[in-house]
Image: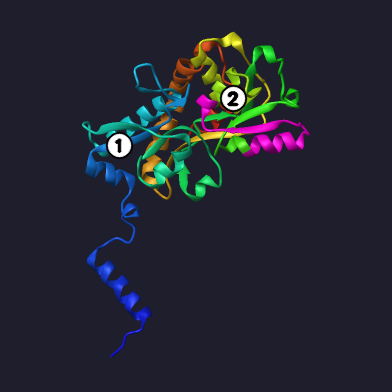
Amino acid sequence: MQIKSSAVLLLLVIVLVLSGAPLHAHDAKGTLEKIAKTGELLMGYHTDSSPLSYENSEGEPSGYSVDLCRRIAAGVKAHLGKDELTVKFVPIASDERVSAVVRGKVDIMCGSTTITMTRQEEVDFTVPIFVTGGSVLSLAESGIQSLSDLSGKKVGVVKRTTTVEQLKNHLQQDLIDAKVVIVADRDEGMDQLNEGKIDAFASDQIVLIGQVIESGFHKRYSLADETFSYEPYGLVVRRNDADFRLVANRAITQIYRSGQHVKIFNKWIGRIGIQPPPVLLAMYQLNTYPE
């Protein structure tokens, strides 16, 4: 007696279901269940996105986003009732921040990731943690004060970031004839700027501020006041994992309600005299949900 291939496939699926073998093992359990079982919370961070997420001089994860994630870790411990939970920070390259969460390499990404609809096809985000916009950094001696001054200039931008298309669109819409130069990462962008290979370096304004802080030579650079995009940041979590996302959001909104976000902002950003812009203050207020 011959069995059609479709019938064989159906039989195989039934056997797998009845035997308890998951078709997608990664999706079979939520993040909280995985953490409870392994006793380990994996938090991804960028090593080069000061002042939000970077490695300090001692090689330790530091920054505004990292501090928020440490508070989330405390929230996870309280939720699971596990005081001995191990929190492990994992360095993740900027172009892997989404895929690292999708693959399960980390449970949450504590960096500077813009919330976009396209990214939400693969992952979810917490409530917003920061708001910034794309801008350009140049050497003070270049005379570049605004985006319109980029005409005839070379502008570097990191590959596979939202800034690439937003910069190109802005230049096109405003008829600014600048050449866009793709660089591998922020370090390469700053190196090319300092060496005169590019005239300006484009990125999120807060990231550029971080580059200036790290350089130690504030007067060497000029940062345009204008922004050419809207960049709401969120922490990346697995898609359709409402329980873990709720724990993370509960920790973040508790920080906003208690006013702890002011201390965290001043610790990492306000220390050089930068005040939170009105749009950021509005973001804090709009995401201060009651318990």
- The residue at which mark 2 appears reads as 205
Residue 106 in which image quadrant: top left
Image side of residue 166 versus residue 233, left or right: right
The residue at 72%/34% (across/down) is 171
Q: Residue pushed farthest left?
A: 84
**Which region shows up in magenta?**
165-188
Q: Is residue 34 above or below residue 260?
A: below
The residue at 52%/45% (across/down) is 119
Image side of residue 11 versus residue 226, left or right: left
Mark 2 lies on a secondary structure that is helix
Question: Which residue type does callout 1 highlight?
Answer: Leu
The residue at 33%/49% (across/down) is 30
Residue mark closest to the camera, 2 vs 1? 2
Q: Position of residue 256 (x, y in %)?
A: 46, 27
Question: Which residue type does callout 2 highlight?
Answer: Gln
Mark 1 lies on a secondary structure that is strand
Q: Position of residue 168 (x, y in %)?
A: 68, 37
Image side of residue 118 versus residue 227, left or right: left
